[in-house]
């Protein structure tokens, strides 16, 4: 499927060769604002919008040649009652399905990432950050499944935040994000769940912006190819006001796909996170996911379990352990309960130092040395 997707993007002959210079040139295409584009122009259009910091870069409509789509069955003659059987057939038939499945917007982004040279990768990640989007933190190679840890692409990213001290004074700070000591909350799921994990995370960071792309975003489809196994990271940075959801900065990590399939990413992030949050459909006593949940539940690290088929309010089952039901519940209410549980976990135990090995470098280290450390400890990363 990966090869087919890259072929549709005309990238099959250019793997790891896309250069920033190719997309920074002023051309007739770049001077136009494209609401629609042909499928083979998706990569160019996406990159040009992203480099101009257009937050709508992910929402590009693809032109289709299916002219008969709206004409099928359109007749000027009135429909008679005798035609009921035919009407039923037309409404229930799948014969008008497109020849190709729609392209998932995140497949466009990740195709560029996989096929870009180092400079374009760094530029792309910097622009994603400026558009307030989540950034790729752990990226499995679609062909070898080796996991890349591209921390070096964060080098130009600075984050600003404001906090109120004990004297009620507002303190402003700006730091390169790879140096900022930040507690991490890691979200993952086992199996298929009806609730959107990414959408729930967005409600904790910024309710008005889709920091993490989710199933209800424009253009989303079931035919995602390159996102499974990718871990994205985004930050909440407080403004120093009473409306802040968290009083300090927080990093949120999101593992896409079934965590039971992506065990290496699960192992790395559950060890490094300050708080683990797992979405579950249901638990079977002897299944592998239950064994992992039991392991995390017995550990001293905070764990929050979200149950898609349970409608109960937030319950603290023991110190640092919470369960929250999602079924038929108001999302704002669930988000508020989750926020309070995460804040309780931070209050109970400070873990920001421990998780620095994966999201920051100490003042005496370079980004490259931190990445090398991760390569030695996980044996899965590559530059």
Image (cartoon, rainbow, N blue to C red):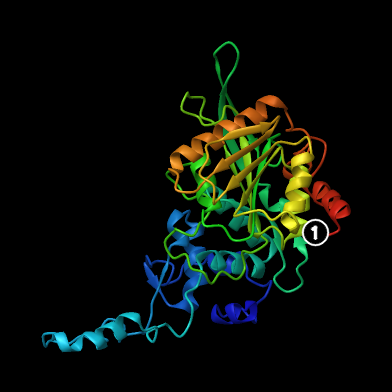
> Is 178 on the left-hand or right-hand side of 309?
right
> Is 368 on the left-hand or right-hand side of 323?
right
Classed neighbour count for the residue bearing mark 1: other residues with Cα under 10 Å, few (<14), some (14–19), many (≥20): many
Q: Residue furthest top?
A: 167
Image location (x, y in percent) of residue 208: 42, 44
| Nearest to the observer: residue 109 or residue 217 | 217
Image location (x, y in percent) of residue 76: 12, 86
Image location (x, y in percent) of residue 150: 72, 55
Residue 192 against residue 316 in the figure, above or below: below
| Tag 1 secondary structure | loop
Residue 12 against residue 159 in the figure, above or below: below
Q: Which residue is mark 1?
A: 381
Q: Quadrant of the image for the C terminus? A: bottom right
Q: Is residue 66 visible?
A: yes
Q: Quadrant of residue 319?
A: top right
Q: Quadrant of the image for the N terminus? A: bottom right
> Is 207 on the left-hand or right-hand side of 309?
left
> Which residue lies at the image location 63% right of the left edge and 28% below the top edge?
344
> Which residue lies at the image location 44% right of the left edge and 58% below the top edge?
217
Q: Quadrant of residue 301?
A: top right
> Which residue lies at the image location 76% right of the left edge and 57% below the top edge?
286
| Nearest to the observer: residue 167 or residue 310 | 310
Image location (x, y in percent) of residue 123: 61, 56
Q: Residue furthest right?
A: 376
| Nearest to the observer: residue 236 or residue 172 | 236
Residue 249 against residue 357 in the figure, above or below: above
């Amino acid at each position: 499927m990966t090869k087919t997707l890259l072929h549709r993007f005309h990238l099959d002959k250019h793997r790891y060769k896309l250069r920033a210079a190719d997309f920074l040139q002023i051309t007739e295409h770049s001077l136009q604002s494209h609401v629609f584009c042909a499928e083979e122009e998706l990569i160019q259009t996406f990159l040009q919008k992203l480099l101009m910091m257009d937050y709508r870069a992910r929402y590009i409509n693809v032109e289709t040649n299916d002219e008969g789509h709206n004409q099928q069955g359109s007749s000027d003659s009135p429909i008679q009652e005798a035609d009921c059987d035919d009407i039923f057939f037309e409404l229930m038939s799948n014969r008008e399905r497109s020849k190709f499945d729609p392209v998932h917007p995140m497949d466009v982004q990740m195709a560029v990432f996989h096929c870009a040279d180092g400079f374009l990768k760094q530029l792309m990640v910097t622009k994603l950050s400026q558009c307030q989007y989540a950034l790729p933190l752990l990226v499995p190679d679609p062909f070898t499944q080796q996991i890349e840890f591209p921390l070096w692409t964060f080098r130009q990213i600075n984050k600003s935040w404001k906090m109120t001290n004990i004297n009620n004074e507002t303190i402003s700070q700006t730091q390169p994000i790879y140096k900022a000591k930040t507690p991490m909350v890691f979200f993952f799921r086992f199996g298929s769940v009806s609730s959107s994990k990414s959408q729930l995370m967005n409600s904790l960071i910024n309710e008005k912006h889709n920091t993490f792309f989710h199933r209800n975003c424009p253009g989303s489809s079931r035919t995602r190819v390159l996102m499974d196994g990718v871990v994205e990271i985004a930050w909440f940075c407080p403004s120093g006001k009473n409306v802040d959801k968290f009083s300090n900065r927080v990093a949120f990590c999101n593992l896409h796909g079934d965590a039971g399939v992506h065990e290496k990413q699960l192992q790395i992030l559950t060890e490094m996170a300050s708080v683990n949050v797992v979405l579950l459909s249901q638990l079977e006593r002897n299944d592998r996911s239950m064994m992992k949940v039991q392991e995390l539940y017995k550990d001293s690290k905070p764990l929050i379990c979200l149950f898609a088929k349970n409608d109960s309010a937030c319950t603290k089952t023991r110190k640092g352990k919470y369960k929250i039901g999602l079924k038929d519940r108001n999302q704002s209410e669930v988000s508020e309960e989750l926020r309070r549980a995460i804040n309780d976990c931070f209050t109970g135990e400070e873990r920001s130092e421990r998780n620095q090995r994966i999201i920051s470098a100490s003042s005496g280290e370079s980004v490259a040395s931190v990445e090398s450390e991760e390569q030695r400890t996980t044996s899965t990363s590559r530059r």
